[in-house]
Amino acid sequence: MSIITEADAANELMRLAKQIAHHNRRYHAEDAPEISDAEFDALVRRNAELEAAFPHLIRDDSPSRKVGFEVAASPLSKVRHEQRMFSLDNAFTDEDVADFVARVRRFLNLPADEPMAFTAEDKIDGLSCSLRYEQGKLVRAATRGDGEVGEDVTPNVRTIADIPELLHGDVPDVFEVRGEVYMAKADFLALNAAQEAAEGKIFANPRNAAAGSLRQKDASVTASRPLRFLAWGWGAASAVPAASQFEMMQRIAAWGLPVSPLLARCESVAAMLAHYRSIEHARAELGYDIDGVVYKVDRLDWQERLGFVAKAPRWGIAHKFPAERAETTLEAIDIQVGRTGKLTPVGRLHPVTVGGVVVQNVTLHNRDEIARLGVRPGDRVVIQRAGDVIPQVVENLTRAVPREAYLFPDHCPECGSEAVAEEGEVDVRCTGGLICPAQRTERLKHFVSRAALDIEGLGEKTIAEFFALGWLESPADIFRLKSRRDDILRLEGWKDKSVDNLLAAIEAKRAPDAARLLFGLGIRHVGAVTARDLMKRFATLPALRTAAQAAQAGDGDALADLTAIDGIGPAVVEALGDFFHEPHNVAVWEDLLGEVSPPPYVVETRDSAVAGKTVVFTGALETMSRDEAKAQAERLGARAAGSVSAKTDLVVAGPGAGSKLKKAQELGIEVIDEAAWAEIVKAAG
């Protein structure tokens, strides 16, 4: 990765979070991707590179912590998964795969000569689905959704010939089979031909066709579409009658569900890569679309120890195929203004098909990226899709052709205010603040979004309309809309019931979740995860404000208290301080808290001896890695900190413990060894 400043990294991570969320929504929730898989993967990879280089800048809304996308409004009912459906991290090179294997070995603290096997299978480009069987009978099917909540597609799944109503053999009482619903290439072409003849919707690719067919309110429509299924794993289960991934997949096949014929067990990195090459070579001849190969640790007891990070298992990874590229013409460059005032250039392309998806728009990121590429309207460019989501320009083919360079605007196209880049930043921002209609409306939209207050009925169109009428200037105004009931009724499209439903939805948020409210304020670097982490520590919003203001004023204890929170670094602390230093922000804050009363944030923890406590690990751990120990602490409801302070409750010290052990002894903090820690873990079950 080229040299980049911390400020640049923070800005780029913010941009990537927004872009990736947008494309995730287009792909997972709307089945209408705007970029290729390769392009999307490139964005995710860039995000991962920056987070690895600047771990203290990881955002609460980081794409690395999210799975899929929240289920949008749908005629299908929602289903909460008993066991979360995770996604997989990606590998793009042979070195990435070797690094993955090395990470697994380090985490498990295995000697270099310890044999370690992995399964390898083709990664189908379809729609993930979980099938719940009870007493061997299919009782429910659900899409992945955001990993925690999906859509109930049981009637639709019953029409898929590959999915049996009854499993045969010694099936556990409860067993959730997970896999991919997909459409074969030949079936996709036949479907589109029939759709064209009937003047119906033409699907962009087999994945979109499968997703659109499965998520039908009328199961008869699904029945008319040639959908198929391949199992790749399982979720909640009353028993798992095998000791390895490979053996368990053979059991699932024996019960009557199809699994990939390309599934193999590999005992070395060389064997994994050889199988990847063979699948890549056969890719064009396969009857269905794939976009990579999935590797999983074979031993299930090791999978259990490895566990999960925010959105993915440590024991699995997807080795993606290279990105696809195409040439086209950049017809125009438009400037969009976001809720933080950032001016983002968007390239409008002559439509081109890349990897089966028609691409018309491309992000140009910022002023510096335009200058680096030297692009101007009319240029021929090479675009790349990395993951069937967001495309990017990778080359300007007509850079040498004489033409005036593109002049990035120095004034906001929305309000006319000066647009500048602060020292050390690459992003150009509108200085208009809340006088800029783009920023005001975008902040209000963010405040009521699903991840924030989630006020049903107050969508983008309504916010824009109410803003134009002067009814909404700040978040607090939302809670004063009840005084405008008669005014709203006079607007086109509003009836008594719809107005009452909206006002009831608003009133229902008078005691909102504190973390969601904090996230909804749109403070820079404070995403959904960071907001939750902050509220876990401070419980109430006034307590957080006091700590942030004290830290900005130079209070070392307050600063240490904030940065002791895992994932909270200088950028977050500075952003909080800046927010509360601005009189207008304080006025918005106090006005809002005059309308709502969020209760103290309560953290649900497992019942263990260390639940709610702060634990520090120091010295060499002999039976596990430091990462595994921290993961254990978090599962037990404790907070794993990196340094010892007066707020530390317990220190686990191994051989070679030094300054941290000494400080713990000076402060009178309880110190135990690794064996005693293992007993705490064992007692908690």
Image: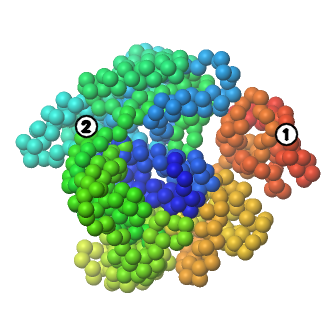
The colour scheme used to paint the residues is rainbow
Question: Mark 1 — residue?
Answer: 657
Amino acid type of the residue tagged 2 in the rendering: Pro
The residue sitting at 64% across, 50% down in the picture is 604
The relative height of residue 563 versus residue 88 in the rendered view (above or below) is: below
Question: Mark 2 — residue?
Answer: 206
Residue 580 seen: yes
Q: What x and y, as percent, mark residue 193?
A: 11, 38
Picture mark count: 2
Q: Does the CB distance between marks 2 and 1 fall below 8 Å?
A: no
Disc 1 on helix, strand or loop?
A: loop
Q: What x and y, as percent, mark residue 493?
A: 25, 73
The residue sitting at 78% across, 50% down in the picture is 643
Q: Nearer the viewer, residue 267 or 448?
A: 267
The relative height of residue 419 versus residue 566 in the rendered view (above or below) is: below
Disc 2 on helix, strand or loop?
A: helix
Where does the C terminus fall, quadrant-wise? Answer: top right
Between the residue at mark 2 and the residue at mark 1, the CA separation in whole angstroms equals: 56 Å
Q: What x and y, as percent, mark residue 475?
A: 48, 75
The residue sitting at 72% across, 47% down in the picture is 640
The relative height of residue 422 versus residue 322 in the rendered view (above or below) is: below
Q: Nearer the viewer, residue 503 or 358?
A: 358
